[in-house]
Amino acid sequence: MEPPVDFFLIRHGETDWNRQGRLQGQRDVPLNPIGLEQASAAGRKLKKLLHKEGIDPAGLRFVASPLRRTCDTMERLRSALGLPPAAYETDDRLKEIGFGAWEGLTWSEAKAVAPALVKERKRAKWIFVPPGGESYADLADRLMPWLGERRPGDVVVAHGGVARALMHILAGVPITEAPDIEIFQGRVLRFARGRFQWF
């Protein structure tokens, strides 16, 4: 029988690049003060949710993308849960989708550099590969082995692109819609029984 709670996903808190609309991809950009508070807020929300469902957070596995913004979010979240901040795992497969040569650019700047490519991406976001980067399809392939290893109740801190890919893989969101779904910071996303729900 499938467990009622499959796993929890938290997007990292805000960075200055998020605020500026820059493509972060796999660049190691730190949280800003708002992002630090969002990370703590997500931890408080998760604490209430786990308490309500009678789940002891100390019995769960915690895993994060190894980038600084996700690790800092995880440590804030674990502190809010009353757990040792650094006692979690990292997994390279949870890194954000790679934007290659476009990392650090805003979309306006990318359009100025490569207007035809940006137009092509708009037509087929799921399969488009930026110069030196990867597509959402590539990201989904990268996540599949990790999905096979997850445990019920895992707490995962990752990225917006990762959440979108998982929404397609696990909840059947069409590839024409998944790349455009808004992924909130400071909230908790639960995947269970082929669905997802925000808290």
Image (tube, rainbow, N blue to C red):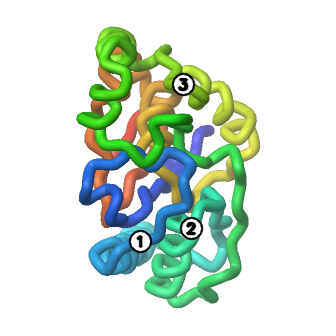
Residue 23's x, y, as percent? 39, 44
Q: From the viewer's perspective, is 146 left or right of 25? A: right
Q: Secondary structure at mark 1?
A: loop
Q: From the viewer's perspective, is 56 left or right of 164? A: right
Q: From the viewer's perspective, is 56 left or right of 184? A: right
The mark nearer the N terminus, 1 or 2, is 1
**Mark 2 residue type:** Arg
Instruction: Give the answer, above or below, for where 23 lies relative to 48.
Output: above
Tell me, yes or no, whether the two marked residues, 1 and 2, touch with CB atoms within 8 Å: yes
Residue holding disc 3: 131
Residue 83's x, y, as percent? 58, 86
Residue 93's x, y, as percent? 68, 44
Farthest residue, direction front: 113
Asked which quadrant contains residue 156, the reply is bottom right
* Residue at screen point 25% across, 55% down: 20
* Residue at screen point 65% across, 61% down: 66
**Mark 1 residue type:** Leu
Residue holding disc 1: 31
Residue holding disc 2: 68
Instruction: Give the answer, above or below, for where 94 lies relative to 121.
Output: below
The mark nearer the N terminus, 3 or 1, is 1
Q: Secondary structure at mark 3?
A: loop
Query: In the rendering, which numbered label is found on residue 89?
Result: none
**Mark 3 residue type:** Pro
Would residue 104 be seen by someone viewing this image from the given angle? yes
Report how far apart the C-alphas of labels 1 and 2 lie in the structure. Answer: 8 Å
